[in-house]
Image: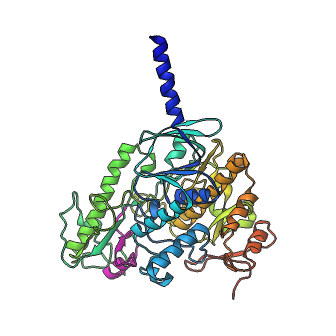
Amino acid sequence: MQNKLLLTGLLALATALSCTRTYDVVVIGGGAGGTMAAIEAARNQASVLVVEETPWLGGMLTSAGVSAIDGNYRLRGGLFGEFTDSLAARYGGYEALKSGWVSHILFNPRTGAEILQNMAAEAGVDLRFRTGLARLSKKNPGWVLSLTDGSRVKAKVLIDGTELGTLAETAGCEELRDRVSAQDFTYVAIVKEYDHPVPMKEPEGYDRSLYVNSCDNPLATNVEGKNPLGQQLWSPEMMLSYGRLPDGHIMLNWPVCANDYFAEYLDMTPAERDSVILLAKQRTLGYVYFLQKELGYSNIGIADDVYPTEDGLPFFPYWREARRIAGRDTMTVEAAKEPYRFDLYTRAIAVGDYPVDHHHVQNPRREELAHLWWGRIPSFSVPMGVLVPTRVEDFLVADKAISTTWEMNGSTRLQPVVMGLGQAAGALAALAVRSGRKVHEMPVKEVQARLLDHGCYLLPFLDLKPGEPGFRELQEKGIRGEVRGTGRSVNWANETWVVVPD
């Protein structure tokens, strides 16, 4: 009898193992960076699986509703440029994407998710939606993952594409501990103007005083055009046109006494974080209710044709930061300001041109942190080592949990930078698997060469664009230090030129 039971157990184990599929690359979290990593890896002949808890790809770009690209408008290269070109084709050109004044590239989150899924499918990426990670174990080499759908997969390289860096934490990556306080996060809403009133029930805990200073209105405590927090009081019309999408929907992601919300969410348990998410939802619903009841926009309500959720809100909030790994390189504000004092630019794999943008207005410590708002830096490059943890092998980070200082996260967290970093992570993972090397053993020059093959910027030189004669040569000379750029801050258009225009 014992022999029979043993045989049965061995057969069951053999069956389970035979059903375990091995992938070159597994990405947990189909966020903005994770999606780009998956597409790039697949285009480099790697077998790739993305495991995503929501039904959409894109993370903050789509699932969180932040469908307004921040920066890199003149640095559209690689998959980021391909994505924005697809948006322009959908809406009738790049000028059509300038529908709101917060961004030059706005879109309906559903449209963005469709484009990203099409790009992933065309690349041959396997997708498992509404699925999460149940268990994770390290092998030598690679990883074994048990998923919440009951399946089991193996990965030669594992990539964290989550919003909060939860996979990196689970995998045992060392964390940078320089955080002073979490940034405010936002539960974005996509609303639209109906042809009839759409009155809301008063949300639980509604407090009108939270919103009276969101814009210039009779209820505002207006002092010389600003609210008591020192923020500009725009007109209600300007407030709503801020995030107007090309199809007429409106993105409500308004940092002026509206739906930003503060909590130290990174140090919370999942249950505690869920409670805070509910409070942030109520803050946003209260904002929509304020628009209807107090400002007279009775026809504006939560859009019923964007998110397939019960309340019509996005799948999760816009988290502005994650737990950041300690990587083989760490990006700093100093390296952005003075790149030639450091050698990080020689290992460049992605670019950004946005200021150091921190949201701390809802934080009780906002006065202490006020110096972090809108910090001026030139456009910058991010080195490859930020993707690679110091201690954990066969692992990369492809979203906001890269190795960047807490302050610099205010710039590296923006969508174009995250997408560029994700593409680099995908190239690094695929090339490592194909060459039989560990990701930390891959020469940066091989990864840089592949990214240049695919039209990416390594350095933010505005002199030449991808596809123009001399672009690749200029980028290669730049990372070798044979030519140097001059960076400058020009309003929001942070720049770097080899030949500086007059």
Residue 368 horizontal/vertical position (percent): 48, 60
Find out whether residue 309 is within the magenta segment.
no
User: Count of labels shown?
Assistant: 0
Q: Nearer the viewer, residue 154 or 386?
A: 154
Q: What is the span of residues highlighted in magenta in the rendered image?
A: 231-260
Q: Position of residue 183 (x, y in %)?
A: 46, 58
Residue at position x 53%, y 35% in the image: 18
Most common secondary structure along the magenta stretch = loop
Location of residue 107 by image quarter: bottom left
- Say if 298 sits above or below 372 in the image: below
How are the colours assigned in the image? Answer: rainbow
- The vertical placement of 330 against 485, above or below, is above
**Residue 437 at x, y = what percent?**
72, 46
- Is residue 305 found left or right of 371 in the rendered image? left
Q: Is residue 2 visible?
A: yes
Residue in view at x 48 percent, y 64 percent: 118
Q: Is residue 26 above or below residue 216?
A: above
At x 18%, y 75%, the residue is 197
